[in-house]
Image (spheres, rainbow, N blue to C red):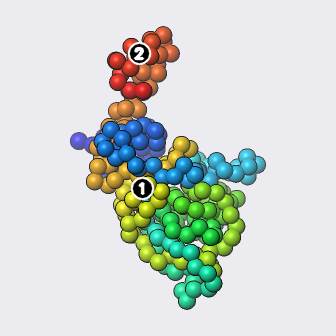
Amino acid sequence: MPLWKNEDEMFALMKEKLYTPVVGDILDQMGYGHQFLPAAIRPLASQVPAHLLTGVKGANWMKLAGYACTVLENDVFGVPKKPFGYMTEALDQLKPNEIYIATGAHNSALWGELLTASAKARGAVGAVLDGYSRDTPMVLEQDFPVFCTGTWAQDSSIRTYVFDYRCDIQIGQVTVHDGDIVFGDVDGVLIIPKDVAPQVIERALEKAAAEKSMRKAIEGGMLVTEAFEKFGVL
């Protein structure tokens, strides 16, 4: 039986108890060795000057867990016949516990203040961009986790076109399917394939507990070799 009653409890448990290194270790053990997105994709809040964070709540800046809503974009040159392509449609159909995850365009920002407000209003729980975000202070003040490669103010209206969503996308070494689980923290973002997600999460929770026990034993004087033999983690 799972350790959670519903998806809300599952994602809350992930954010409370898990961290990307331990989940990545379990994925490796299960034969999924290419699940981390590129290292450049990091929490927006970790990339900005500290003074921009002053006075902002920020409870959700550095961690996210939810289902992938995949978005595929491409670069364009000039005003397209349909401005932004299907970006508004992609935003409008977001569901609770989903994460907007986009790739394919690199000549402009892929995210900003109004997209944050739109996603949050639909119940989405984060955004992951294989590219840039903008409107940084206004995004941060909405207490909504955004992970990206950096910040850049250049607008997408004449440079970027969303031409599909809820389709397979490729980011770095990872193929992301719509409905996979996206999990991110200060150490990066990984993708848990939906078909094995319950097993991965349960095994990761077990490993996280074992790591805490092993650390306590080492701090109490146990040698690393002995601790590794006892707890089986490192």
Q: Secondary structure at mark 2?
A: helix
- Image vertical order of residue 25 relative to residue 104, above or below: above
Q: Position of residue 167 (x, y in %)?
A: 38, 69
Q: Quadrant of residue 130?
A: bottom right
Label 2, residues with CA under 10 Å away: few <14, some 14-19, many ≥20:
few
Q: Earlier in the sequence, mark 1 or mark 2?
A: 1
Whether residue 83 is visible to the viewer of this picture, yes or no, is yes
Q: Amino acid at mark 1?
A: Val
Q: Nearer the viewer, residue 96 or 104?
A: 104
Is 89 situated left or right of 138 in this image?
A: left
Q: Amino acid at mark 2?
A: Thr
Q: Residue at x 67, y 60 (%)?
A: 151
Q: Nearer the viewer, residue 124 or 151?
A: 151
- The single residue placed furthest to the bottom in the displayed view is 81
**Residue 225 numbered tag:** 2
**Residue 174 numbered tag:** 1
Q: Nearer the viewer, residue 119 or 185?
A: 185
Is 85 situated left or right of 153 in this image?
A: left
Q: Residue at x 69, y 70 (%)?
A: 154
Q: Quadrant of residue 22?
A: top left
